[in-house]
Amino acid sequence: MKKLNYEISEFSSLRDKPKDIYFKGDLSLLGKRKVSIVGTRHPISYTKQFCLNLGNALKKRGVCVVSGGAMGVDALAHKSSFPNTIGVMANSLDILYPKVNYSLLKDMQNKSLLLSEYEECTPATRYSFVLRNRLVVSLGEVLVVAEADLNSGSMRSMEIAKKYGKKIYVFPHRLNDSPGTNKILKDGDATAIYDIDSFADMFGKVSKVKDEILEFCTLNNSLQDALEKYGDKIYTYELEGKIAIKDMKIFVL
């Protein structure tokens, strides 16, 4: 891990600015347009699918997704936008936590970007998660709260966003599925995302560059045929969230 030798502009308005920022990965991602996505560690299936769709839509438009590296919504946001994603950690970067996300965080420190305000050998604490949220919110132009209970860290992130004038978006949920986001929507503190592409279009446009592998997989969803033609590149595309593999078939995302 290295210490950043300049101040991140998005943190300049914070009243409790971090003293130092440490990083691992690609600092060029800080120069991209960014959207922050947060939510519960135990999302329902509906939320999981929309998180994957949203992260992938933003990635296609060259937009960087920011989240907190936790399990659940955070992990889905990072995976679906990989490698176009930034993780802000509640511990030092020599510790890959939570363990359930070890492989994801390892890939992110090599091909994406991990940030932390903590020096080596600093474990996560309950308070450090709260502090981490202000950095996640600050980095994004807007905040998306995918799903949340009323008394949750995601709701604290929403309060931070309101404090600093960040616009808040939520997925529209059934009445009892996400009481936190339903409340802020009812109170007029958030805008619902009814169309993923329309939302993502506010931050960028889809590249017109053709992708030979994706075109092949669209026309022929056989995993065996794709592996014979493109080899391990197929699994790289799966890791980057461009495709999903199930029952020996490929689905373009």
Image: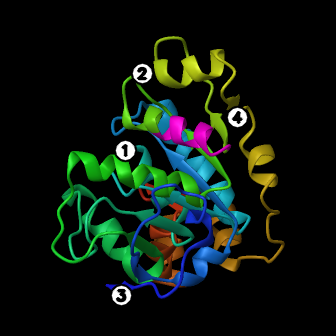
Quickly name the residue at label 4.
Answer: 193
Q: Which mark is first along the chain, 2 or 1?
A: 1
Describe residue 104's horizontal placement relative to residue 55 as left or right: left
Tell me which residue sits at (55%, 62%) in the image.
81
Disc 2 to disc 4, how far (Cα)? 20 Å
Q: Is residue 177 above or below residue 154?
A: above
Mark in the foreground, 1 or 2: 2
Q: Which residue occupies the foreground of this view, 151 or 117?
A: 117
Q: Are marks 3 and 1 in contact (CB under 8 Å)?
A: no
Mark in the foreground, 2 or 4: 2
Q: Are marks 3 and 2 in contact (CB under 8 Å)?
A: no
Q: Is residue 47 above or below residue 38?
A: above
Q: Which mark is first along the chain, 4 or 3?
A: 3
- Location of the C terminus (image quadrant): bottom right
Tell me which residue sits at (47%, 63%) in the image.
17
Q: How many marks?
A: 4
Q: In which quarter of the view is residue 243 placed?
A: bottom right
Q: In which quarter of the view is residue 181 placed?
A: top right
- Location of the N terminus (image quadrant): bottom left
Q: Which residue occupies the foreground of this view, 225 or 135?
A: 135
Disc 1 to disc 2, how far (Cα)? 17 Å
Quickly name the residue at label 1.
Answer: 72
Q: Which residue occupies the foreground of this view, 85 or 141?
A: 141
Tell me which residue sits at (60%, 48%) in the image.
53
Q: Magenta segment, which residues?
A: 157-165
> The disc labelled 2 sits on which kind of residue?
Leu
Disc 3 to disc 4, how far (Cα)? 37 Å
> The disc labelled 1 sits on which kind of residue?
Gly
Quickly name the residue at label 3.
Answer: 2
Quickly name the residue at label 2.
Answer: 150
